[in-house]
Amino acid sequence: MREEPPPPRHDWTIEEALALYQEPLPLLLDRARAVHRAWHRPDEVQLCTLLSVKTGGCPEDCAYCPQSSKHHTDVGPERMLDVDEVVSRAREARAAGSSRFCMGAAWREVKDGPAFERVLAMVRGVKAQGLEACCTLGMLTDEQARALKAAGLDAYNHNLDTSREFYGEIITTRKFEDRLRTLESVRRAGIGVCCGGIIGMGESVRDRVRMLVTLARLDPHPESVPVNALVPVEGTPLGERPPVDPLELVRCIAAARVLLPRSRVRLSAGRAALSREAQALCLYAGANSIFYGERLLTTPNPDRDDDARLLKDLGLRPA
């Protein structure tokens, strides 16, 4: 009879988590894999599709983001997509194997009015296709979160990005506490929380650990935890950052798996720069969700056919 795993912890200290993160990589992988097998089907990977429904023109100054109006990039403001167009893309995503459809808008915060009403209609349309619906729209009020829940939203993405201590080096137009307040509104509305971060922005290892510990101290843990590697974009303040060492991404995913055993850990931005072998190691380390499709908002992602071949060669199947 299968033994029940110990319940998730919410009392990790920074020093405990740092010691875990810095274990020799083979030992960390062994530990992460054991946790993964205890909590998840080891042969399943959730496929998610991410679509930008309103691109560019964001008033935030996030140093990594080409959609910020503060940066000089090739991404300019575009019209918001029509509901029918989004539903058609959701239908295509489902036919290609995705089970979750995520919609992103380059907003600092949600504002009541026609644009938000259109998003609610998009959520209802995506749900009608038999998909999980997820949104990332910036900061929310309790009332807006309840409206999204009533429309059928399954998950809301609002990443911490980095540690509280490093946050001001990356974003000055909002505070770390604003992120946490939005997560509280999402949770109070009964919507699943999708929250992770980005590595490779100049943060220290301790900053990465602090971010993971912040997530691990949430009760309950986020249902989904995207782990992103910075994709440097010309014209942004981080456009000249060197690429993330793939083994650092593997290490971060493995630590996330141990600290957040019940969560789906999503191998997210930066995957297009990884070899098949590096992606396989990330999946072995505990990632059990990927974004599936050619683009992530405005950055490239591996081709669907390449992903299908990789999963087939690894003997993995869509969740």
Image (cartoon, grey):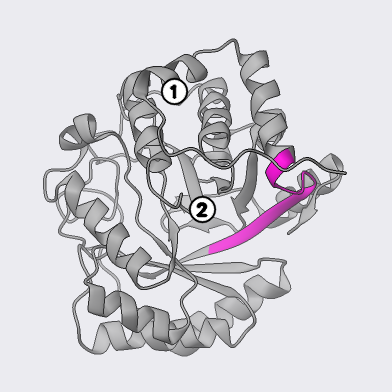
In which quadrant is the C terminus drawn? bottom right
- Number of the front mark, 1 or 2: 1
Question: x and y percent of residue 62 in the render?
Answer: 22, 46
Whether label 1 touches label 2, CB < 8 Å = no
- Quarter residue 105 falls in: bottom left
Question: x and y percent of residue 230 in the render?
Answer: 40, 36
Q: Secondary structure at mark 2?
A: strand
The residue range painted magenta reads 38-49
Q: Give residue 224's mark.
A: 2
Question: Which residue appears farthest toward the left when viewing the image?
Answer: 173
Which amino acid lies under the numbered mark 1 shown in the image of this protein?
A: Ala
Question: x and y percent of residue 103 in the render?
Answer: 44, 69
In which quadrant is the N terminus drawn? top right
* Frontmost residue, 255 versus 90: 255
Q: Is residue 76 magenta?
A: no
Looking at the image, can residue 230 be seen?
no
241 up-or-down from 218: above or below = above
